[in-house]
Amino acid sequence: MGRKNSKKKQKEKRSGGGGGKILKGTLDITRSGMGFVIIPDAAADILIRPGDFNTALHGDTVKVKVDKFSDGRKRTQGVITEVVQRKRTEFIGRLQMNKGFAFFVAQMDKPMPDIYIPLEKINGATESDKVVVKLTSWEKGEKRPVGEVVSILNIEEPNDAAMKEILLENGFPIDFPDDVLEEAARISETITETEIKKRKDVRDVLTFTIDPADAKDFDDAISFRVLKNGNYEIGVHIADVGHYVETDTALDQFAYDKATSVYLPDRVNPMLPEHISNVLCSLRPHEDKLTFSAIFQMSPTGSVKQYWLGKTIIHSDHRFTYEDVQEIIENGTGEYSDEILILNTIAQKMRRQRFKKGAINFSSQEVRFKLDEKGKPIGIVIKESKESHQLIEEFMLLANRTVAENFSKIRHNDKEVPFPYRVHDDPDEEKLLPFIAFAKKFGHKFNTSSPQAIAESFNQMLKDVEGKPEQHVLEQLGIRTMAKAKYTTDNVGHYGLGFENYCHFTSPIRRYPDVMVHRLLFQALENKLSIDKKMEEKCKHCSERERAAMECERTANKYKQVEYMKNYLGEEFEGIISGVASFGFWVETILHKCEGLVSINSLTDYDDFRHVESDYCLVGHRSGKKFRMGDKVWIKVVAANLTKRQLDYEWVVNGGQEKK
């Protein structure tokens, strides 16, 4: 009897039965196979033994039952009782055929069980094929999950497989499910007269788009006309995604789950199917399009006299690239040059005013790879923010700020309405102080008496540092001291932009929060507001997906850097120290903007180096030699590991300038 009770208790413990506290967190599985559930704001992670995962995989959001918390001597242990949400359901790996069934072995650095594939679900794959498999079910108590082959990868295109793996490991599906594609395909392109009558018709007003040369999804357009009173009417027209993507559909749910498009060096992984993003909603020239607009009456000095928000129908007269518009700005001639030049003058005035009021002017330099037809990097392109980019940026900021400001005043039963604001908190003093001390070494002083004074000090530093060797390091460190922008219903304002109210309204083709903003704004304009009690949860989800997309982009760029630098093994280059840690320092080559690690182990023959955190440097114990962030050094490329997406450099003692 005693043994039976003991077995029953063990079974209850494994299944999460009985008492204990239930917590929610994210499962992190180590390479050894041990698991830890990370609970937000908790002092320590909860240890989960492999037998207690209960179908959870690495990265999944789970519920964990804890019977006894740590007393300081032993780590808190728990049992996973439920998988709340899977981080990913698709994996890349190899197929192994057996009689009557197949097994899929995932290509991952985290342990996971093989997936059982019924023969009718292998979709033409054969032994050892590299495939993408979708996990379709995994019942509790079952040893292995069940899946199906989604696609077979071409082994001659390793770059394609690498980009897909980066997307999948961050929880972004590669393809749209059939039901989502079917829903999108069924949406009619016809704009009915009934729909037109519900909207402000601005098709007779000069309207154009300004986008990158390779863009296909034009989600914003600008309209312009001179009014009789001498003021200008400037319209910011945004694709009316909400009209086509209805709530409570498979299409809407999929877009919400994804929450954002992901931009990799050689592809876009879109939030919405191509039929919507590139056809129905893309504000293509010489086509009538449904839009949601912010139309401003502005004085020639750039002050807003009045505005109107609502649904419209537009007809774009011209599609400009940024290069086209930049040429008009620089030369003063070209199609619609008068209108472009007026818009640019107003945009530059708004920009100056913004910085005067406390916005921080971090420069935005983008490094992009030139790729061949197979996606291999063959060169580096540095994109800088020019006045043509700033023209669009300023009017989009104006529209976003106006929508948020308008909504912040709305009350429902005398209460604020949950709304997805885009916020950026004031700097954290703890992070700021070491940076201020470091900047002081380069002669820059900071006034910390108020958040606005800090912003003014930042702008002064950024102005003074322009063109100097320490520019890059101070900009990068400055950005790191800042809080991360996020979506939330708690409207604390946007510190970096200097706005009290801000939201994302202008890119609903590629960001789900913009879709939510459109829907709420339309409800408010129609006096049909409904309170969404899950809005904060949705904001957190969108913020998390945005971070995952940024991680995808960072990892994919790193892959391209490694792929590119494989061509230069053994060669020496000048670089700038871009980061320092106890185990070495990172160097970004000046020529290619490719970052690699100089391990502290490779410096042991020269000296014994220690890490001085407050000075962002490594210091030699005997020689006093310093490797500090922002210093120029010469390095040799010694290894380029594509699997680990890792570049290894070695310091060249008398390299380049040091030889002179």
Image (cartoon, helix red, strand yellow):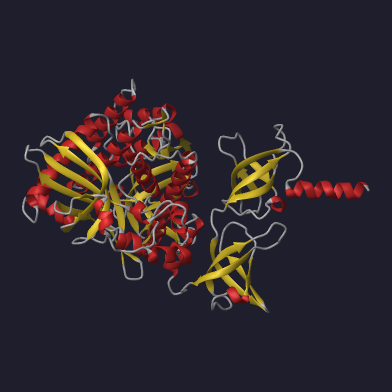
Where residue 428 appears, as percent x and y from the top left, is 42, 29
Q: Is residue 395 left or right of residue 512?
A: left
Relative to 431, is 146 above or below?
below
Where residue 293 appears, as percent x and y from the top left, is 25, 46
Q: Is residue 26 left or right of residue 423?
A: right
Along the line of sight, the residue nearer the viewer: 13 or 289: 289
Where residue 234 appears, as percent x and y from the top left, is 17, 44
Q: Is residue 470 visible?
A: no
Q: Residue furthest top?
A: 449
Residue 437 falls in image quadrant: top left
Q: Residue at x 43, y 45 (%)?
A: 585
Q: Is residue 17 left or right of residue 171?
A: right
Where residue 543 appears, as percent x and y from the top left, is 44, 44
Q: How many numbered discs? A: 0
Along the line of sight, the residue nearer the viewer: 591 or 427: 427
Relative to 34, is 183 above or below?
below
Along the line of sight, the residue nearer the viewer: 314 or 167: 314
